Amino acid sequence: MPGWITFWLWTTAALVILMVAVGGATRLTGSGLSITQWRPVSGALPPLSSSDWLAEFARYRESSQAKLVNAGMSLQDFKHIFWWEWAHRQLGRFIGLFFAGGFLFGLVTRRFSWRLGASLAGMGLLLGLQGVIGWVMVASGLKPGMIAVEPLDLAAHLLFASLFLVTLVALATSLDEGKAVRAQIAAPLRAARLSKLILGLVVVQVVLGALVAGSHAGLLYNTWPDMDGRLVPPLGELFTAVPWWANPFENVTLIQFDHRMLAYGVLALALANAVIWWRAEVRGAPRRLGLLLAGLVLAQVALGIATLVLAVPLSLALAHQLLAMLVLVVATRLAVQSRPRARPVSAVQRPLAAHVATR
């Protein structure tokens, strides 16, 4: 397998992490609704003249966010939020072109097997869908009366970005010729299963974090370990939305509570997994990744607590989101490299196994 393929995949993964960071800054600065049109091609060019800027500003001033939140905004202030959203969209375009360029080059030069080509094509569709969801998210915030995007749309946007990142890291890890495949070390069965469970829960936690951010639930209870003096809010506050199944997506108290509880659960599982790897007889990359994952999750929980208690300052919120992506990367690598150790054949089974082998 040519070495450039894994380099291309890892570079794309790094760009996705950067994209998430820029997207977080765009949301936290209130810039996401500054561009009110979706122009996949012509939108790559920013306003180039004073009249262009005035026209762009006029379109923004028609939005509910401009009327209800930024009524007194100057053109200079508008340029500040515009450049954040423009940079976010351009980085998305660049990632799409970078991934498509590598894919087309591999097809033309016949560097991909049919299986690898099909996997990459599916990943390309996932990336394209992510772009569409991004515009659907922005459009939700441009509806009359809306001053921000829908929390569920924001969560879907981050979910698909996370899934794309997971596929990139998983494929790059499995194709890494000298480290991931031939040097793969058999893991204790419990660690192998636990590593995959942790990866799934980390993805869910990322989605919950997006719901917290989109609904501003992080500004509701800024105390820890309690929630304004209560470890568990009463059911009357946790289930106020109608119908009841909408509460995990709309009830800000339940959204923050779920995010807290799952954070504790992921931390407990990551520490347990680290202990299993520490006591295991095997050595190598998976063992180191298990220990690293536990350390990163612990740091992420501490950073999340600081972000909450300090009422979500921009720097800590961005660091929290960026560290979440690093946790996701390490969890993915560990899940891929944790190959379960085969069970030993018992004394009763050996004669039967030998008989089958000679037939």
Image: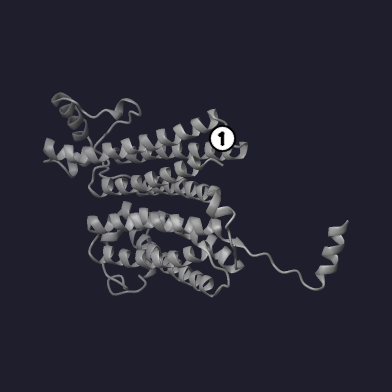
Q: Is residue 272 left or right of residue 143?
A: right
At mark 1, the secondary structure is loop
For the residue pair 274 and 126, the one nearer the viewer reads as 274
Q: Position of residue 22 (x, y in %)?
A: 30, 46
Q: In the picture, residue 93 is in which quadrant?
A: top left
Which coloring applies here?
one colour
User: Dot 1: within a 10 Å radius of its alpha carbon, few (fewer than 14), some, or many (20 or more) residues?
Assistant: some
Q: Position of residue 352 (x, y in %)?
A: 85, 65
Q: Quadrant of the N terminus?
A: top right
Task: Identify the residue at horizontal 23%, vertical 62% (top origin).
Answer: 311
Task: Identify the residue at horizontal 41%, vertical 54% (top origin).
Answer: 207
Query: Which residue is tagged 1?
Result: 111
Task: Identify the residue at horizontal 27%, vertical 70% (top origin).
Answer: 223
- Where 151 sits versus 233, above or below? above
Q: Position of residue 94 (x, y in %)?
A: 36, 35
Q: Quadrant of the C terminus?
A: bottom right
Task: Identify the residue at horizontal 34%, vertical 44% (top origin).
Answer: 19
Q: Amino acid at mark 1?
A: Arg
On the question of residue 232 being in view, the answer is yes
